[in-house]
Amino acid sequence: MDRLSDKYLRARKIPSTACSGCGLGQAHKAMVQAIDELDMKVNDIIWGTSIGCAGRQTFATWNGDNFAGTHGRVYAIARGLRLAIPPEMKIVLTVGDGDAFGIGLNHLLHAARSNTQMTVLVCDNLGYQSTGGQFGWTTPQGVVTDSSPYGMSEPNWVQPEMDVLNVIKAAGATFLARHVSMDGRALVDTCKKALQNNGFSLVHCVFPCITNFGKNALGSRNAVNMFNWIKNHAAPLGEEEENPEIFWRTGIHYDASNSRTEFSESLREQTAEIQRRYKDEGSH
Amino acid sequence: MKRFLETGNFAITEGAIMAGCRLFAGYPITPATEIAEAMSAELPKVGGYYVQAEDECAAMHIAVGAAAGGMKTMTATSGPGYILYADPYGWAIGCEIPMVVLNSQRVGPVSGITGAPGQGEFYNSRYPTQGGNYETIVLAPNSAQEAMELTVEAFYLSERFRTPVTILADQLITDGLEDISVPETDEEKEAMGLRFMERKVHTGPEFYPPSDEIDIPPVVLGKGTGAMCSDWTPTEEGYDIETVEAQHKHSYRMIYKIRNNKDIISRYETLFLDDDPDIIVAAFGTPSRTVKTAVKKAREKGQKIGMIRPKTLWPFPDEAFSRKSKYLSVELDYDGQMVREVQRAAPSESEVHFFGKCGELPTVAELHETFDKLLNGESLSRKGWEREAW
């Protein structure tokens, strides 16, 4: 165990049961490091997760309070939880690409609309990998998966003309970023900014799945091969030019941190005002 | 005591707030919309929150999420929304989180008839989510007044049993305008038989022991206890695990905390059972009121007819059906649902019959015709229906 693990994570769950060569730990660690650099304590955060590789491998790793919700519904659970917990506590969610951009997208958009504080780290392994490797909503076009044996024919949510981050931005999110898991320092800095927004923050982070995606799409379970493949298809925002080989435009896509009132804060204020009014009038 | 001429929806809201409900999450649906409206008006006055969700699936998840954070919460819907609760029901049952769900049944399947009463979710309420390995608690009021009282009881039971408790009402109960008495003092509440329990916090860090114990406080997130709850099979500490041994322990608790403490839950009303009646009629919810009138009038005619009205549908009050008799289950569905439980619970030599209607109540005349047929040993099958059809 390293210093961050000792300070924030449960010995029982670290190392996780992720496959050898999985990049999820890079994304996970970046968030924990961001928390540490912001000098936050274990009990400042409730850590929620969902289904699939991202949910299963990060559930109950946090040494404080943990929950794992139903597939795609954690954004709704978090909206309720947000009203019950102290306002200064933060909710961090580690979820998969299927969860955030597939089954849970409607709930996620409503969490963004209401600007409910939650820092959503979408750990994207480019499809449904824990079920064996089917295509998802960020799987690059043409790629072979277990459910696209002739190549993925559908467009996806990271194509520039239909970037899911634009959809979530239009829905009202106040912080949006995209990275690949090997972004290191830049990813940690982004996570710090995401955590400092008292509102809806989402960090989309692509990470390599060697076991299924690597095998199917790249024809190899060589980890270095896939790490390089992801790196070669990513470029910082503004540097991608018109290169069709760049799938992931990395960096902060939108930062309107703390520009809109947070959902629970506004509901708490309105409720307090109504309660005062009816107390003064002495009526119920 | 405050007196109102109001709807069941109003009465339910009064009961919930009295029981400590401070968050209601809902989605507009006939005939439960007025509960959401009343909650949106009343909850802020007592420091509570109304949240309107994008769909019923989210509504119940929001309510369970807040309950997991230590609040007393509720949601309400009708059939088409109730099926969208399947997902969060599973989470609440599996994580053992207390909350209250109300279903004002209308006519189904699917959207069916929106503003008319049905009872098609009798079995749905027993198995509101997939996977089995659990028992549920379901209460069935037959008036606005009783809807208020059973709402209070639902909150009480949910806290003691760490599980979502369902109130299975129908359109006539929630929409119907009736005389309602709302107690104000502790004495009035006690005289009405209302029971209350505050939310307590499980101090963790472990989850729950593999036993049928009740009154263990539920896990609460945000209290710094290191709490864990998930949709997966838990270890005794709350970690996720995939072993049949852990699933056995988890299932045992979810089933037997309710089965072995049924006496705390079970409620039913009986009428004219002491003289070995020739027919015992079973009914719950609104139709039980016309049944009661029909049974009383039949008695005046000298017919020996009795009645059982379950107020708890699940666990089903088998003990109420221990007499050998001719049973008649009267329900607001054509397929016959509760009748199957009556058949199972009644002594094997009993005859069990079914009278079904949907969207409107059976009339006293229809019921009397049915009683006469049964007393004469005639078949109840109706024209166009090959059998009693269940």
Image: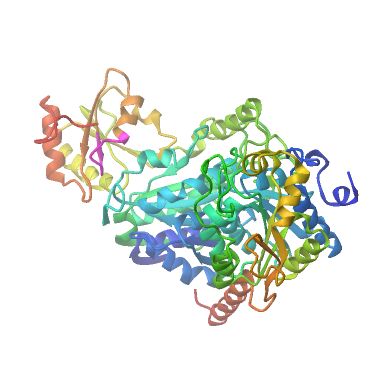
* Above or below for B287 versus A45: above
Classify the position of the N terminus of chain B by image quarter: bottom left
Q: Is B337 a magenta residue?
A: yes
Q: Residue furthest top?
A: B349
Give the total of numbered labels: 0
What residue is at 33 percent from the left and 53 percent from the top? Answer: B143
In the rendered image, is residue B219 in sight? no
Most foreground residue, B348 or A117:
A117
Q: Quick one: quadrant of the C terminus of chain B?
A: top left
The x, y position of residue B293, in whole percent, is: 21, 45
**Residue A175 seen in this snapshot:** yes
Q: Using the image, determine if residue B183 lies above or below residue B345.
A: below
Q: Is residue B243 left or right of residue B336?
A: right
Residue B139: image location, x then y, percent: 42, 45
Q: Pinpoint residue A99: horizontal percent, then vertical percent.
A: 58, 52
Q: Is residue B121 magenta?
A: no
The quarter of the displayed image where residue B354 is located: top left
Which range of residues does the magenta coloring cover? B329-338
Residue B311: name its quadrant: top left
Does residue B127 appear to the left or right of A26 in the view shown? Answer: left
Q: Position of residue B356 (x, y in %)?
A: 21, 39
The colour scheme is rainbow
In this view, the residue in front, B176 or A81, is A81
Which picture quadrant has residue A164?
bottom right
For the stretch drawn in magenta, the main secondary structure is loop
